[in-house]
Image (spheres, helix red, strand yellow):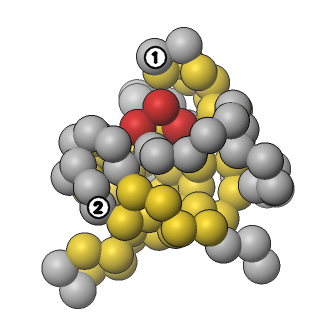
Amino acid sequence: MYKRQTSTNRATHQYTCPQTTCHSVRTVGKGWGFDVECYKRGQSVLGSTVWYRGWVFQYEWVTHGFIAAKHLKLSGNPAPGVPVCRGF
């Protein structure tokens, strides 16, 4: 399974799907770690339709969901080597 660690470049939300109209799993603070699993295209955020699915580990609480690419410290759109999410 693919895994890449990064962090958020601003406060944001983690969602159940790649749209801001989906359920917000949690609020994510600036600089929090995020383990990327894959990417999927969705709602445009700051000019990018790429969203990354993965895990946030903070305060002994683990959540899984999507964060808009523009809110993460990753280069590329999508970042090289990140696989497409299948079945989500």
Residue 67 at what x, y percent from top left?
Answer: 46, 45
Other-residue count near label 2 (Cα within 10 Å), few / some / many at <14 / 14–19 / ≥20 = some
For this orientation, the residue located farthest to the top is 47
Residue 6 at what x, y percent from top left?
Answer: 48, 60
Q: Is residue 27 left or right of residue 55?
A: left
Q: Is 47 or 13 nearer to us in this picture?
A: 47
Seen at 47% across and 46% down, the residue is 73
Residue assigned mark 1 = 46
For label 2, the SS is loop
Seen at 66% across and 72% down, the residue is 3
Q: Amino acid at mark 1?
A: Leu
Seen at 33% across and 42% down, the residue is 9
Residue assigned mark 2 = 32
Q: Is residue 59 left or right of residue 5?
A: left
Residue 27 in view in this figure? no
Q: Is residue 40 above or below residue 62?
A: above
